[in-house]
């Protein structure tokens, strides 16, 4: 039935693979022992998954394991969960990425969690891909040195409107920049700029809602180059060039 609902052979195949993996014998899929130092990481992941289920108290887990990621204080919690209610025996893959902030004064904000649970065809595909990229020691995005990311172009407010090319005249007396020196675009008029501080560990995206390319830690000062709809800020360390986009709820302004 799931294959008939899938909108592509690849998605259907991945769903079958996910359900096949998740359908292993209960005696062979017992939860892996989690080291004591990872107990809070696993608890945060399981609480996040329960909060998204219709029957939180009926959610069950098995084959759970915590994997330290390449980025410091980031962990992938991988395993199988039954989120379909007390009468279901179906387990599906899940991956929860937990970013821990050991400096947080409020214990309730020590961890931020992003979860993918393969409960639908599209989510099964995401969970399968996340499993391959994160469920091993040193998985996930690699730390990137500052100033090594190509500046991301600012997205236009109206994506559907045709864009007319504009030629900007260059003064004949302006010398070209030295070879190898990046050209920094001037600030976009009307956008709010200034400095912010990371309020907690947060992901840096290549574009608004784009792939994660790194993590900035709590207390890092960032310069805001521009803003995009939906609460996204284009930031950089220093005011030389941007390194990516961060969601505004993760920072506080000076």
Image (tube, rainbow, N blue to C red):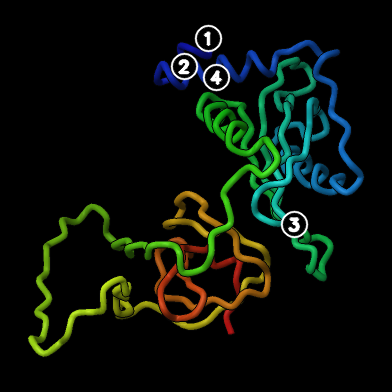
Camera-near label (2 vs 3) is 3
Residue 239: image location, x then y, percent: 44, 81
Q: From this viewpoint, which residue is outermost toward the bottom?
A: 173
Disc 3 or 1, which lies upstream in sequence?
A: 1
Residue 193: image location, x then y, percent: 43, 81
The reply to whether callout 3 and callout 4 are in contact (CB within 8 Å) is no
Above or below, comparing residue 135 to residue 119 in the picture: below
Measured Cα–Cα span from mark 2 to mark 1: 7 Å
32 sits left or right of 8 in the view: right
Above or below, comparing residue 133 to residue 188 in the picture: above
Q: Residue at x 46, y 76 (%)?
A: 224
Q: Residues within 10 Å of mark 1 (few under 14, many from 20)?
A: few
Residue 152: image location, x then y, percent: 37, 62
Q: Which residue is mark 4?
A: 15
Q: Which residue is mark 1?
A: 1
Q: Residue at x 76, y 31 (%)?
A: 55
């Amino acid at each position: 039935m799931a294959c008939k609902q899938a909108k592509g052979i690849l998605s259907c195949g991945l769903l079958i693979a996910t359900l096949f993996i998740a359908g292993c014998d209960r005696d062979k899929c017992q939860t892996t022992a989690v080291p004591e130092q990872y107990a809070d990481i696993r608890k945060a992941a399981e609480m996040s998954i329960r909060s998204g289920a219709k029957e939180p108290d009926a959610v069950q887990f098995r084959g759970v394991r915590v994997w330290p990621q390449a980025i410091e204080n980031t962990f992938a919690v991988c395993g199988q969960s039954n989120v379909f209610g007390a009468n279901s025996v179906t387990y599906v893959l899940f991956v929860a990425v937990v970013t821990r902030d050991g400096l947080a004064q409020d214990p309730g904000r020590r961890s931020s969690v992003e979860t993918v649970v393969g409960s639908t065809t599209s989510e099964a595909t995401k969970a399968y891909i996340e499993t391959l990229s994160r469920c091993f020691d040193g998985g996930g995005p690699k730390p990137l040195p500052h100033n090594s990311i190509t500046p991301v172009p600012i997205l236009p407010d109206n994506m559907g409107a045709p864009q007319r090319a504009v030629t900007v005249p260059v003064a004949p007396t302006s010398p070209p920049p030295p070879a190898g020196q990046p050209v920094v675009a001037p600030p976009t008029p009307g956008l709010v700029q200034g400095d912010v501080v990371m309020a907690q560990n947060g992901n840096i995206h290549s574009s608004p809602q784009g792939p994660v390319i790194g993590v900035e830690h709590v207390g890092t000062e960032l310069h805001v180059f521009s803003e995009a709809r939906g609460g996204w800020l284009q930031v950089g360390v220093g005011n030389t060039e941007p390194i990516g986009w961060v969601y505004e709820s993760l920072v506080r302004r000076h």
